[in-house]
Amino acid sequence: MDENESKKEMEQRVIDSFRQDETMMAMVFSQWCINNGLDPESVYREAYGTAVNPVLQEAVKLAVPKEEAGEVSSETVIQVLSLFGNDTLGEVVYKKAHMKGRDES
């Protein structure tokens, strides 16, 4: 394997890892919304003006009913969103949590 192939392989691993992490972020966000009686795509639309996000759509499909889910704190979802630069969405989550008295900070 030459240096060019090795570099491409490493780049692909980084991309794959990012995609997995992005999926995890979307799942945490989706589950928090569902646990709090909110529609994830509506909350996303409020932040970004669009609900067309394939990763989010897949995460919504994989989310479980509130009764089957573990607790996802507002603080956790905001921190996860922040790690991916989704501060605008994090602000909407904070407002929604605060409005409903669910800000466990």
Image (cartoon, helix red, strand yellow):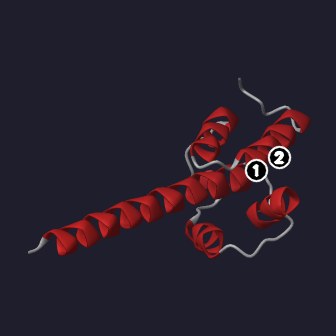
Question: What residue lies at 58% left-to-right and 73% top-to-bottom?
Answer: 58
Above or below: residue 71 compared with residue 8: above
Question: What residue lies at 57% left-to-right and 51% top-to-bottom?
Answer: 69
Q: Residue furthest front?
A: 3
Name the quadrant containing residue 13.
Answer: bottom left
Q: Find disc 2 in the rendering and name its residue.
A: 92
**Total numbered circles:** 2
Residue 51 at x, y percent in the picture: 78, 71
From the viewer's perspective, tell me whether residue 12 is left or right of residue 9.
Answer: right
The C terminus sits in image quarter: top right
Q: Nearer the viewer, residue 7 or 15?
A: 7
Residue 68 at x, y percent in the picture: 57, 54
Q: Residue furthest left?
A: 1
Question: What residue lies at 55% left-to-right and 45% top-to-bottom?
Answer: 70
Residue 29 at x, y percent in the picture: 65, 53
Q: Find disc 1 in the rendering and name its residue.
A: 89
Question: Which label was assigned to residue 50?
Answer: none
Report the Cα–Cα distance between label 1 and label 2: 5 Å
What type is the residue that disc 2 sits on? Val
Residue 7 at x, y percent in the picture: 24, 66
Secondary structure at badge 2 equals helix
From the viewer's perspective, tell me whether residue 46 is left or right of residue 40.
Answer: right
Q: Badge 1, how many Cα within 10 Å: few under 14, some, many 20+? A: many
Q: Nearer the viewer, residue 7 or 83?
A: 7
Q: Residue furthest right?
A: 99
What type is the residue that disc 1 sits on? Leu
The N terminus sits in image quarter: bottom left
Name the quadrant containing residue 63.
Answer: bottom right
From the viewer's perspective, tell me whether residue 4 is left or right of residue 21.
Answer: left
Above or below: residue 55 compared with residue 14: below
Do the residues bearing badges 1 and 2 touch, measured as CB atoms within 8 Å? yes
